[in-house]
Amino acid sequence: MANSIDSIEQRGLLGGDSEESRHNEKSLLQSFTRSHANSRTQKAALFVLSVSIAFNVLLATLYLRALSPSQSEAPSKYAELKHVREEPYVIVTPYASDNETLQDQLWYNINVDSAVVALSDDWVAQHELRKAQRFPWDQSKGIYILHGFHNLHCLKIVYISMSEYRRGKPQTRSWHHVSHCLDALRRQIICDADDTPRATDRRVEVVSGLHQHRQCRSWEQLEDFAKRHTACYKRPENPDEASASKLDRFKHCPPDSGYVVTDDYVPTEELLEGLPEESLQDHV
């Protein structure tokens, strides 16, 4: 500013004290005072506007989070899954169909081979897991079974056992295996401790939760995680054959896996006993 307050003070000390000069100085002082007052008003208005914008952004964020719980939800520890799907609590699916042929086909065709995954020791250490038995085609990886697939496997075991009993057929699954699966599912239910109140209705059949929905994770995303960490596992249709080898189960690697499968591998320990033992079945 050409006529700043400093220049006015200098003229007051060095110049004459004429009426005209005093008038000019007074005008300049008034102009400077108004300019300073306007500047303070603008700053105050800018501050209020900034606070208002920040408050509205906060409200919008909270509103969006309320509409979409998955946005604020922490992902699962391993496959980083979130609740992204909504489904009714009560729905009759073909797995409970009156068409027993269809029902059997669906249950028997559940395939849990993808449950077996190969995870690197580095990944395992980062996620605080313990080391597992070695994966044949990469000794820096261990063999693991995904828990969700294990539970699905158990449901299939229980269904097969009940179906065979209902039809008077010999049991193909041992009682020890069936009771193990029932106990595994019992512990899972207690672990989940689902506290959702399901509304009751005056109906003859036992039903609750009508018109209520729950948020679910994506099973497809879990399957994608399993595929990304494939252990090349596939249970043979006739695993009891004398020529069947446990190592052969790990030889079904996709072309892009990068694993080199060889018949020369000699395991230092017995490969993966037990689960998952259910593949596609043909003895319905």
Image: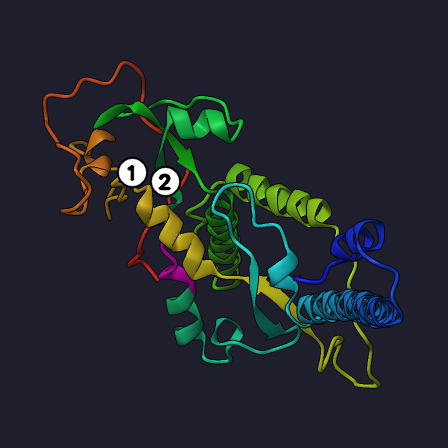
* Residue at numbered disc 1: 231
| Vertical position of residue 45 compared to residue 161: above or below | below
Residue shown at the point (78%, 84%) measured from the top left: 204
Magenta part of the protein: which range?
A: 107-111
Residue shown at the point (41%, 47%) measured from the top left: 172
Q: Nearer the viewer, residue 140 or 271?
A: 140
Q: Nearer the viewer, residue 113 or 14?
A: 14
**Image-quadrant location for residue 101:** bottom left
Q: Nearer the viewer, residue 272 or 33?
A: 33
The type of residue carrying mark 1 is Ala
| Vertical position of residue 259 compared to residue 235: above or below | above
Using the image, tell me which numbered label, if any, was put on residue 116: 2
Which element type, helix, strand or loop, lies under badge 2? strand
Q: Is residue 89 visible?
A: yes
Mark nearer the N terminus (1 vs 2)? 2
Query: Badge 1 local density, few (<14 within 10 Å), some, or many (20+)?
Result: many
Q: Nearer the viewer, residue 23 or 130?
A: 23
Query: Badge 2 local density, few (<14 within 10 Å), some, or many (20+)?
Result: many
The type of residue carrying mark 2 is Val
Residues at discs 1 and 2 in contact (Cβ within 8 Å)? yes
164 vs 279, left or right, is right
**Image-quadrant location for residue 203:** bottom right
Residue shown at the point (84%, 54%) measured from the top left: 12
Which element type, helix, strand or loop, lies under badge 1? loop
